[in-house]
Amino acid sequence: MSAVTDPEVSCPLCRVAADRQSLCCPSCREDLSVLFRLRYAGRIDYNRALDALDAGDTATALLRLHSALEAEPGLDPARELLESLSVAGPGGAVPAGREGDTPSE
């Protein structure tokens, strides 16, 4: 799989890089969890696609992979998994590893 760098989330108020653990600005303590969710939407959908594949739900996995690529077109692991599912047909692919553990929603 291709390496993907973590997107940075900056506070819109003070332009300081946000803390990935607390989901807050370290300067003004503004809650930035919504910005993290938007920034990581593609990775969250990718990981949900993996969950769907683990559960044997290929149709949901395909929808989640398409959503992941809409949110983050450069998310190569999602693109590669989508291509392998398209080639393998229903139920033919083995789930890949998780992409960039991200903050909980």
Image (spheres, grey):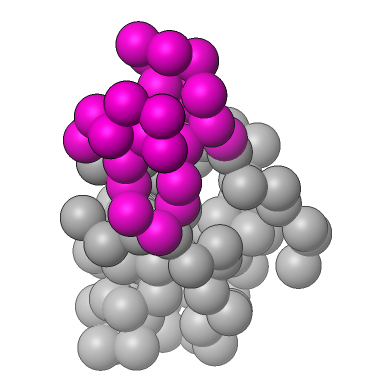
69 left or right of 47 in image:
right
Residue 86 at x, y = what percent?
A: 54, 61
Q: Residue at x 40, y 59 (%)?
A: 21
How many marks on residues? 0
13 left or right of 104 in image:
right
Q: Is residue 82 magenta?
A: no
Q: Residue at x 42, y 38 (%)?
A: 26
The boundaries of the magenta stretch are 8-32
Q: Residue at x 28, y 87 (%)?
A: 56
Residue 25 at x, y = what percent?
A: 37, 34
Q: Quadrant of the N terminus?
A: bottom right
Residue 92 at x, y = what percent?
A: 51, 84
Q: Quadrant of the C terminus?
A: bottom left
Q: Nearer the viewer, residue 46 or 103?
A: 103
Q: Which residue is situated farthest in the top direction here?
A: 13
Q: Is residue 98 visible?
A: yes
